[in-house]
């Protein structure tokens, strides 16, 4: 028994042999407690764990890696940390941060450890960060992009699993992507179900991956309802400079509202754009949603839930994408689905709020009133 006995270790870094002497057991028994690879009695385990705590013993991960060829480490490359400061300067959904939270939720439950490195918004940092992770013998890598985009990453050693989140490459690397086409389709279909048939679309930049997919979803929803696609009410209105974007929006809205058959709804490329559209429409003296309806995309709740009326929008399921990313990487590490290189599409729901008038309901109420008056 170690009770009442002073530990043989004094100062320096405690070793497995110091723990064994303090606990009154063999070094092999301590190893069994550490690695869980052999039977150990409860009292013996408690003695070893107490000795480790008293001595401040830290197991050598490097030695364990050499024995098992497994580090228990997952490397994540992201811009989430450096871009988080944007929250104080401009409305931003910080998608990479939400994706990272989803990844962390799964990895923490797996018993593995995340090593996170931030690019600081510099693409030239990606290759050195990957090399650093490989030197630490990570079991897999995750790359998280700020928005749905194409990326080009350095070639990895054969057998090093990599999963891309919110992005894809030409090499067919496993990727987790938002289902932009379905999201826009479901939103427009819901607006049509509310009785709207003249639905304008103010899109994001045409050179980003999400835009053609969402335009396809918009078109498909119209076609399914027997409504023709009219390019006159589809306009790209997204610029990185806020002032220029506001001017584009004003011009597009002004031209569309002057049409002989103006739109009854403006679908916006994201919630930030919808916020500006609210202001433009109100500056023209229009009531929302009585005279004109507006939708967004993202479900950035700081905007969507605080606008008046609250904004109808689509959820971009970033946290779910993070969960799917981690699950796919862990499956690949375990040997499952290594040959499956198809992207995983993750969809989110439509959040129906008060920014869209239910025209069908209004029409039904009007007809009932007319019939009652006739009687």
Image (cartoon, rainbow, N blue to C red):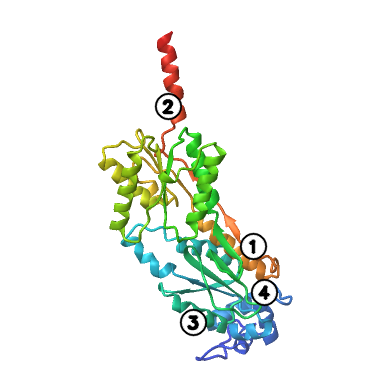
Question: In front here: 137 or 167?
Answer: 167
**Element type at marker 1?**
loop
Labelled disc at residue 308: none
Labelled disc at residue 342: 1
Q: Which residue is mark 2?
A: 362
Please tell me which residue is depicted at 35% across the width and 33% down the height of the picture: 290
Q: CA distance from mark 4 to mark 3?
A: 48 Å
* Marks 4, 2: nearer the viewer: 2
Please tell me which residue is depicted at 44% across the width and 19% down the height of the picture: 367
**Element type at marker 4?**
helix
Quadrant housing the N terminus? bottom right
Instruction: Choose the circle earlier in sequence order: 4 or 3.
Output: 4
Q: Which residue is mark 3?
A: 128
Callout 2–callout 1 Cβ contact below 8 Å: no
Please tell me which residue is depicted at 31% across the width and 36% down the height of the picture: 287
Q: Is residue 344 visible?
A: yes
* Marks 4, 1: nearer the viewer: 1
Left or right: where does residue 283 sit relative to residue 150?
A: left
Q: CA distance from mark 1 to mark 3?
A: 27 Å
Callout 1–callout 3 Cβ contact below 8 Å: no
* Marks 1, 3: nearer the viewer: 1
* Residue 51 percent coordinates (x, y): 58, 81
Q: Which residue is mark 4?
A: 43
Determine whether 240 is above or below 29 in the image. above
Callout 4–callout 1 Cβ contact below 8 Å: no
Please tell me how crowded label 2 is: few (under 14), some (14-19), or many (20+) other residues with Cα within 10 Å: few
Q: CA distance from mark 2 to mark 1?
A: 45 Å
Q: CA distance from mark 4 to mark 1?
A: 51 Å
Instruction: Choose the circle earlier in sequence order: 4 or 1.
Output: 4
Please tell me how crowded label 1 is: few (under 14), some (14-19), or many (20+) other residues with Cα within 10 Å: few
**Element type at marker 3?**
helix
């Amino acid at each position: 028994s170690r009770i009442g006995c002073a530990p043989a270790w004094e100062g320096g870094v405690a070793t497995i042999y110091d723990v064994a002497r303090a606990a009154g057991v063999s070094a092999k028994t301590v190893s069994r407690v550490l690695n869980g690879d052999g039977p150990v009695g409860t009292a013996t385990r408690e003695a070893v764990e107490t000795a480790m705590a008293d001595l401040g013993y830290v197991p050598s991960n490097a030695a364990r890696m050499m024995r098992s060829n497994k580090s228990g480490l997952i490397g994540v490359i992201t811009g989430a940390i450096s871009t988080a400061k944007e929250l104080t300067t401009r409305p931003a959904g910080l998608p990479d941060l939400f994706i990272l939270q989803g990844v962390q939720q799964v990895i923490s439950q797996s018993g593995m450890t995340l090593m996170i490195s931030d690019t600081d918004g510099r693409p030239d940092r990606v290759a050195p960060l990957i090399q650093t992770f490989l030197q630490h013998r990570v079991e897999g890598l995750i790359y998280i992009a700020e928005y749905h985009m194409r990326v080009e990453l350095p070639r990895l050693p054969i057998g090093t699993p990599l999963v891309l989140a919110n992005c894809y490459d030409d090499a067919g690397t496993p990727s987790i992507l938002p289902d932009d086409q379905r999201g826009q389709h479901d939103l427009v279909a819901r607006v049509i179900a509310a009785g709207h048939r003249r639905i304008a679309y103010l899109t994001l930049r045409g050179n980003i991956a999400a835009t053609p997919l969402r335009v396809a979803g918009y078109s498909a929803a119209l076609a399914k309802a027997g409504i023709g696609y009219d390019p006159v009410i589809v306009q790209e209105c997204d610029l990185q400079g806020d002032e220029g974007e506001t001017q584009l929006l004003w011009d597009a809205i002004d031209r569309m509202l002057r049409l002989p058959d103006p739109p009854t709804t403006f679908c916006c490329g994201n919630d930030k754009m919808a916020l500006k559209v609210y202001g433009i429409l109100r500056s023209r003296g229009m009531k929302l949603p009585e005279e004109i309806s507006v939708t967004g995309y993202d479900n950035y709740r700081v905007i969507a839930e605080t606008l008046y009326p609250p904004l109808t929008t689509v959820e971009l399921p970033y946290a779910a994408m993070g969960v799917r990313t981690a699950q796919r990487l862990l499956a690949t590490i375990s040997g499952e689905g290594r040959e499956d290189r198809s992207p995983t599409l993750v969809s989110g729901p439509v959040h129906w709020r008060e920014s869209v008038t239910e025209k069908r309901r209004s029409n039904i109420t009007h007809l009932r009133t007319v019939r009652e008056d006739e009687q």
